[in-house]
Amino acid sequence: MVNIHKIPEPLHFFAAVFSKAGYSCYLVGGALRNMVMGKKPSDFDFATDASPEEVIRLFRRVVPTGIQHGTVTVLHKNESYEVTTFRIEGDYSDARRPDNVEYTSDIFEDLKRRDFTINAMAINLETGEFLDPFQGKKDIASRVIRAIGNPAERFNEDALRILRAFRFSAQLSFTIDPETFSGIVDCKEKLYQVSAERIRDELEKIILSPTPSKGLQQMEKAGVLPIVLPELSACTGVQQKGLHQYDVFEHSFYSCDAVPAEKKAVRFAALFHDIGKVETIDYDEIGVVTFYQHEKTSVRLTRNIMRRLKFPRDFEEQVLHLIANHMFHYEDIWTDAAVRRFIAKVGKEYLDDLFLLRRADQYGTFGKPIDPVNLKAFRKHIDKVLAEAHALKIADLAVNGHDLIKIGIPKGPAIGIVLRELLETVIDDPSQNSRPILLTIATNFYKQIS
C-alpha cells in the first residue's frame, strides 16, 4: 500500500483544489506505480470526474494538450500535471487513439481502458483510498507485465502498447505474462499502422533502459524486431570469428547494455555498429570468416534506420561518426604523427565517446568487462600528443583562407584543398606551422594543382 503521508506535499495541495470544488481527483499512472515499487515518482498524472472545461475554470494556467480526448496540462506552483477526465473510449480505427470518448463519473470504468495492470491503480490523495481493480500491486510483486482483460483487444486498440510492454519489461526488469506475450505475437502486424515517430520514442526508451537487451531479445522472440528494426534482426545467427562468444545479434545488444544510459549516442552506436556484417560476410582463402569494411555498411544501414524513424539529424550524425570510426587498431609503433592524424580524423570532442564504444564492443565480445590494456596505452599516447597543443584542425593553422586569397589563390574549392594539404603537412611536422612557411608551401602546392 502507498503511504499517503509520503506523497509530496504539493500533490496534496493540487488535489485539494478539486476536493474543495466538489470533484474527486486520483493520482494514476507511472508515478503511482513507482510509489508502489518504492521508487521516486515523477511525471504526475491525475484522473478526475471534472470535465476539461471545469478543470480549466479551476486553475489559472491550463494547456489544452489533448482536450479532444479529455486531457489538459495544468501548470500549478511551478509544476505541471497532466489531468484526464474519467472516460469510456470508443473504437480505435487508426490503431492509435479512440474515435470518440465518453466522459463518466466512474473511476473504475476509466481504469478499465488502460493498458497494463501495473498502470491501472489509483489513489485519492484526499481520502487515501487506494484502488487496484486488476491486481496491479500483485503483478508488481510478481514482476509481471500483464494486459488488462483480453490482450489482443488492448493491442488492437493501440499497437504501440506492444512496444510499451517491452519497454516496461526492460525498464523494470519484469517478465511479460504468457497470455499477454501471445497477444503481442498475434497482433504484431498492427505495428505497421503506427507512425515512425511513436515507434522511435518507445524504441528510444527501450534502448535507454537499464537493460536494453532484455527488451530487444523478447522483441526478436515475438517477431516484433523484424518489423521495427529488420536490420538488427537480420544479425541473428551470423557467427563471428576468434574470441567472439556471441553471434552478431547477441554481440550488438550486449555491447549496448555495456554503455551507460546517459551516453545516448554511444548506446545507439553500440547497438548498430556491426549490423553491416550481415552484408559483408565473406571467407578468406583458408575459410576464416571476414567482414571487410563492415563499418561503412553499418553506417549506411544505420542512416536508413535513423531516417526511417525520423531521428534528429544532429543526433544521427553523432551516431554515424562513432560507427564509422570504431574500427581502429592501435600499436606501440604508432608515431606521434600517426596519433595526431587519428585525432584529426576522429575529432577531439569524440575521443571519450569513441573509447567508451570500444570498451562496450569488447564487453560484447567476451560477455564481461576486460582490462583494456591496449586502449589505456593508446589513451596515454593521445594525452601526450594533446598536451603538446599542436595543430589538429584547419582552425589551428597559422594561416587561413583570407591569407591564401591574398597570395593569389582564388576563392572557391581550391582554398579548401590547399588548407587540407597544409593541415596534413603540419600534422606530420608541427614545426611547419608558421605563417611564412605555410604560405610558401601553399604557393608551391597550388601551382602543382592548378
Image (cartoon, rainbow, N blue to C red):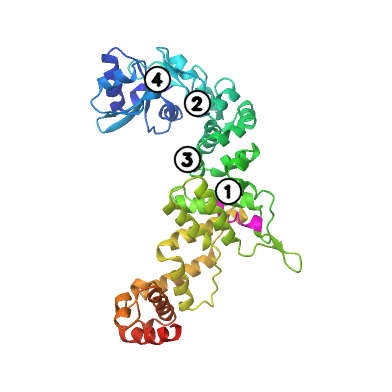
Quadrant where the image shows the N terminus = top left
Q: Is residue 146 visible?
A: no
Secondary structure state at the residue bearing disc 4: strand
Q: Nearer the viewer, mark 3 or mark 4?
A: 3
Against 174, residue 419 (above or below) is below
| Disc 2/disc 4 C-alpha distance (Å) | 13 Å
| Disc 1/disc 2 C-alpha distance (Å) | 27 Å
Check disc 2: other Cα within 10 Å, few if <14, some if 14-19, many if 20+: many
Q: Nearer the viewer, mark 2 or mark 3?
A: 3
Q: Is residue 31 magenta?
A: no
Check disc 3: other Cα within 10 Å, few if <14, some if 14-19, many if 20+: few
Out of 60 and 132, give the one closest to the viewer: 60
Picture coordinates of residue 10 (x, y %)? 28, 27
Against 259, residue 88 (above or below) is above
Check disc 4: other Cα within 10 Å, few if <14, some if 14-19, many if 20+: many
Magenta residue span = 271-279
Residue kind at label 1, given as amino acid type: Phe
Residue marked by disc 2: 118
Q: Identify the residue at horizontal 32%, vertical 14% (top origin).
A: 23
Label located before the other in sequence (2 or 3): 2
Against 252, residue 196 (above or below) is above
Residue kind at label 3, given as amino acid type: Glu
Label located before the other in sequence (1 or 2): 2
Residue marked by disc 3: 197
Secondary structure state at the residue bearing disc 2: helix
Q: Identify the residue at horizontal 34%, vertical 71% (top origin).
A: 395
Say which mark, if any, is on residue 123.
4
